[in-house]
Image: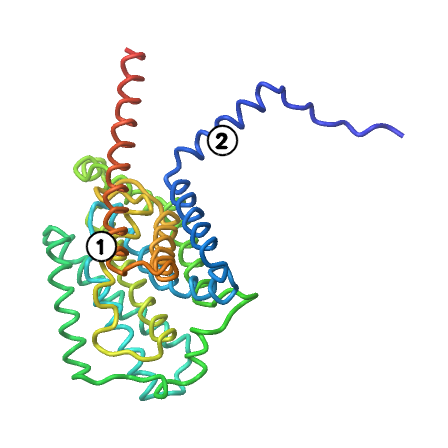
Amino acid sequence: MSARPTAPAAPPERADGSRTRFAHRLWLAREFGIVVALGLLVLVTAVDNPAFLSPQSLRDLALGAAVLVVLAVGQTAVIISRNVDLSVGAVLGLAAFATGKLLSSAPGTPTAVVVLVGTGLGAVCGAVNGALVAAARVPALVITLGTLYAFRGVDHSWARGQQVNASDMPRSFLALGTRTVLGVPVLAVIALVVTLVVGFYLRSYRSGRELYAIGSEPVAARLSGIAVGRRVFTSFVLCGALAGLAGVLYAARFGTVDATAGTGIELQVVAAAVVGGVAIFGGSGSVHGAALGALLLTTIGSSLAVLRINPFWQQAVVGGLILAAIGLDRLLAVRAANRLRGRSSHGA
């Protein structure tokens, strides 16, 4: 009986070097800081009130973050192309009210059809934003600020003060907001799937990677043959579609919708992306970081309530996090530029 050949063991120096490089990459990853901050926040809150880590509390936390995560993922695709979409709150409200009206007038509508209608409505709103930004080449901040009020006005005109209540919607749809899979809320599972799919698209597809090139240097991207206008248009359609999906999830979770649904959430969405390491000047960041940023902001809101801290400080903490994230982003950019400059001087 012959002995099976075994692969030679890696030299100790090489193994130590691999661990050192892995630890160095982990330290430099922007998501690492968010995970550490999230862990410390949960630890401090749990020490004060152990019920914060109860299964019901964790489920509520996941439910609260699900809608914000979906919005932040779509916003990330826009921000990395050096744009921003401030209309996502109005699109969410419009899709949520459309969902309520559809189900109240046709209770037998399958949930899949409702999701498609809400997502499609959001995609149409995103196409309006994308067409105005890409074709007219008007700053996205101005365009989406205008469509924010335009979409909200359409919602108010349609609703005319009406409100769709949970009793007007079928239980099968409302169960979407309360059902769990292995203890995890379905809404959180949907948010996770959205994050993974969009993250895979941005990382693995050429059109997704080109968004980073556009955000890094739009002029150079255009000179290199990248269809800048089409890519930016696509990112806005994606962001609008996810805002529409978030509207459907919002209606399923809260059960009661009116024309004010999602008011003011656009600033939380941008904050989640920036806190999650997405560069506000475009070109870098990940949807995973944005999702962690949304989870961090949601956890801050819950923690401050548990710690019985004035809600005013929640906004102050969020503002401080945004300033810290932008400062860290500039610091990392300067360090990267200095590193490249050093390599160039050594190579000269």
Of circles 1 and 2, the one toward us is: 2
On the image, the x and y values in percent for residue 129 come to 18, 60
Q: How many marks?
A: 2
183 lies above or below 289: below
Residue 246: image tag: none
Q: For mark 1, give the secondary structure.
A: helix
* Quadrant of the snapshot with the N terminus: top right
Q: Nearer the viewer, residue 206 or 345?
A: 345
Q: Residue at x 69, y 23 (%)?
A: 8
Q: For the point 45% across and 47% down, which residue is it?
A: 39
Mark 1, residue position: 233
The extreme right residue here reads: 1
Residue 168 screen position, x and y as percent? 34, 88
Query: Which residue is denoted by mark 2 in the rendering?
Result: 22
Few, some or many residues within 10 Å of mark 2 (<14, 14–19, 20+): few
Report which quarter residue 3 is drawn in.
top right
Query: Which amino acid type is marked by label 1?
Result: Phe
Q: Is residue 180 left or right of residue 149?
A: right
Q: Position of residue 231 (x, y in %)?
A: 25, 50
Q: Quadrant of the C terminus?
A: top left
